[in-house]
Amino acid sequence: MKPFIITLIGKDKPGLLGSLADIIYQYQGNWQSSNFALMAGRFAGFAEVEIPEESVAAVEKALNARSDIQVTLSPGDTEPAPPMQKAVVNIVGNDKTGIVNEITAVLNRHKVNIIRFESQCESAPSSGSPLFKAAAHCCVT
C-alpha cells in the first residue's frame, strides 16, 4: 500500500463524499483520515488514503473521470515524521485584512511549523463587528 493525498473541490451535493469513498473501496484502498467542509459555496477538502501500488493508475483514472469535481491525487510521504513538540495556539481578535499573514509571520520568525490551521470569521457577540478566530496546531522539531 502506498500513501496518497486526494484533494477535491466541487459543487456540493448529497453523496459526493460517498462516491469518492466508493472509488477508494473498489480498488482495495484504505481511507486513513480526511478533512472536508463547505467553503464559499463549494465542497472542498482532502483525504489521506492508502492504495495498492497496482491500483494507483486505475484510481487516478476513476477520480479524473468525474466531471462534477476537480480532484488531484498526490503521493504521500513514506518517511516517518521526526519527533516533535506540539502546541495549539488559539487566536481571537478583530478581523482585518492581512491577519493571517501577520500570524504566520510571527510563527515563522520563531521557527514554528504549522501542521494544521483552522480559522473562521463570525460576528462579535456584543458589537456585531467581524471577529477572527483561529487555532494553529504547531510543532517544533
Image: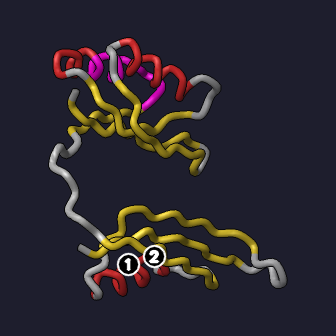
Look at mark 2 in the image and give the residue it sits on.
Answer: 100
Q: Is residue 138 magenta?
A: no
Magenta-colored span: 59-69
SS at mark 2?
helix
- Residue at x 31%, y 35% (from the top left corner): 72
Tell me: residue 98, above or below residue 12: below
- Figure quadrant of residue 25: top left
Q: How is the image coloured?
A: secondary structure
- Figure quadrant of residue 100: bottom left
Quadrant position of the N terminus in the picture: top left
- Residue at x 55%, y 80% (from the top left corner): 91
Contact, mark 1 vs mark 2 (Cβ under 8 Å): yes
**Separation (CA) of disc 1 from disc 2:** 6 Å
Position of residue 120 in the picture relative to residue 85 (left or right): right
Q: Position of residue 113 (x, y in %)?
A: 30, 72
Tell me: residue 130, above or below residue 69: below
Q: Is residue 68 magenta?
A: yes
> What amino acid does circle 1 point to?
Thr
